[in-house]
Image: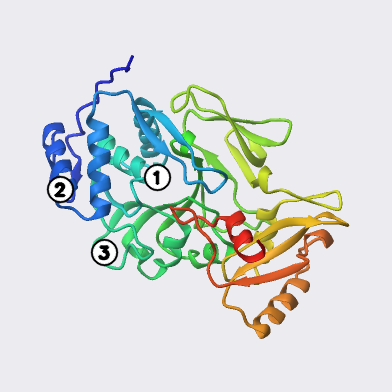
């Protein structure tokens, strides 16, 4: 039996591409987007029609960056609760101007739509490209991007007041690039199961704190965190999920509201009996290499697994030697954290929404 759900009326302040809509008018606009719009607009139209159906659930697909893509049925009620929490955390009220530059095929794009309709934002759509601000000439209160989009938008970031960045780790080099900007830039932590983010951390605080490790994530309202026996994050967020969510994210809990993210347990490399966290090692190496990088373990007779480094760059013997020297001189790396080999590859394999696909990149190079 299909569970019925009465979708609330769209917030009276909501605008899509400068137009006000009631539920009925929005349904007609969705048909027009599907019939006459570009592919990204068709996806928005499809989502709106799904949202306005009297069904309690929406089907959402994961990106596949940490495994095989999966489909989930998500409660619309939980999506509304998540939107309200985001509005409170980032202090975004009705009438806020927001830009949607992410594909609506995935949860991050869908949640931007739900936030706008629920909170009464004025939402504009642009093509979900690698350079989303190229044709933007107005100032927005809020926007969500991937790290790759942010990297290509630094020069025009003054057009965004508050920016959240998710869908992949933000490199140290990218964090350096946003320092001193007027835009408040936040890295988010979340997944499809938590309806986008459940925590965020400011990447460019006004007052720089002298600290060896990066700023911890702060959880959103009505989210409780703990760890399991693997030191992985456990999330209880009853307003966005009926079930307790056990992640594969290794963390250090600072307070009941703050945690440090160390890396994915399924990425951990066991080399000579020493557990290595690739994401932590990548943060260190990013201090001397500006290109996109990742480290991964491959089978080794002596060590069990040996650590190797991939750098996104066209092959050059000179560059390879230069990178080897830089990594070798990096004093922050422990002995087992130094990659045994460096591979240069012109373009990393990616998931459909732009995250680095580590395993596929490894297979493409080594087989």
**Disc 3 from disc 2: Cα separation:** 25 Å
State the mark number for residue 35: 2
**Disc 2 from disc 1: Cα separation:** 24 Å
Q: Residues within 10 Å of mark 2 (few under 14, many from 20)?
A: few
Residue situated furthest bottom in the rendering: 318
Residue situated furthest top in the rendering: 1
Q: Nearer the viewer, residue 286 or 205?
A: 286
Residue situated furthest right in the rendering: 302
Residue 215: x %, y % from top left: 59, 50
Nearer the N terminus, badge 3 or badge 2?
2
Count every numbered label the image shows and give the total: 3
- Does residue 299 appear left or right of residue 38 in this picture? right
Question: Marks 1 and 3: CB-CB under 8 Å?
Answer: no
Q: Secondary structure at mark 2?
A: helix
State the mark number for residue 136: 3
In this rendering, is residue 366 above or below 95?
A: below
Residue at the image point whose x is 47% and y is 58% from the top: 147
Nearer the N terminus, badge 2 or badge 1?
2
Residue at the image point whose x is 38% and y is 36% from the top: 88
The residue pinned by badge 1 equals: 108
Q: Residues within 10 Å of mark 1 (few under 14, many from 20)?
A: many
Q: Within the image, what quadrant is residue 71 found in?
A: top left
Q: Nearer the viewer, residue 238 or 364?
A: 364
Residue at the image point whose x is 69% and y is 30% from the top: 228
State the mark number for residue 206: none
Residue 1 visible, this orientation:
yes
Q: Nearer the viewer, residue 114 or 303?
A: 303
Q: Secondary structure at mark 1?
A: helix
């Amino acid at each position: 039996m299909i569970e019925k759900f009465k979708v609330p009326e769209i917030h009276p302040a909501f605008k899509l591409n400068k137009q006000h809509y009631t539920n009925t008018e929005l349904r007609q606009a969705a048909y027009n987007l599907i019939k006459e719009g570009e592919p990204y607009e068709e996806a928005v139209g499809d989502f709106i029609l799904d949202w306005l159906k009297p069904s309690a659930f929406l089907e959402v697909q994961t990106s596949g960056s940490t495994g095989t893509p999966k489909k989930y049925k998500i409660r619309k009620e939980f999506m509304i609760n998540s939107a309200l929490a985001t509005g409170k955390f980032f202090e975004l009220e009705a009438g806020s101007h927001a830009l949607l530059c992410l594909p609506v095929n995935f949860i991050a794009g869908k949640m931007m739509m739900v936030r706008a309709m629920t909170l009464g934002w004025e939402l504009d759509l642009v093509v979900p490209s690698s350079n989303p601000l190229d044709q933007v000439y107005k100032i927005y209160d809020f926007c969500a991007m991937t790290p790759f989009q942010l990297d290509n938008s630094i020069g025009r970031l003054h057009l965004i007041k508050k920016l959240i960045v998710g869908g992949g780790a933000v490199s140290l080099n990218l964090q350096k690039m946003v320092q001193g900007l007027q835009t408040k830039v936040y890295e988010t932590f979340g997944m499809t199961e938590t309806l986008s983010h459940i925590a965020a951390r400011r990447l460019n605080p006004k007052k720089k704190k002298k600290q060896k490790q990066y700023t911890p994530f702060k959880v959103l309202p009505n989210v409780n965190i703990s760890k399991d026996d693997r030191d992985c994050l456990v999330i209880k967020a009853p307003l966005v999920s009926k079930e307790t969510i056990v992640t594969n994210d290794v963390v250090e809990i600072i307070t009941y509201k703050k945690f440090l993210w160390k890396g994915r347990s399924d990425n951990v490399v066991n080399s000579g009996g020493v557990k290595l966290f690739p994401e932590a090692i990548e943060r260190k190496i990013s201090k001397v290499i500006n290109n996109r990088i990742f480290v991964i373990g491959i089978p080794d007779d002596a060590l069990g697994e040996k650590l190797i480094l991939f750098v996104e760059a066209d092959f050059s013997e000179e560059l390879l030697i230069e990178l080897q020297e830089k990594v070798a001189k990096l004093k922050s790396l422990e002995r087992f954290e130094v990659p045994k080999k460096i591979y240069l590859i012109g373009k990393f394999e990616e998931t459909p929404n732009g995250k680095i696909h580590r395993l596929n990149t490894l297979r493409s190079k080594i087989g």
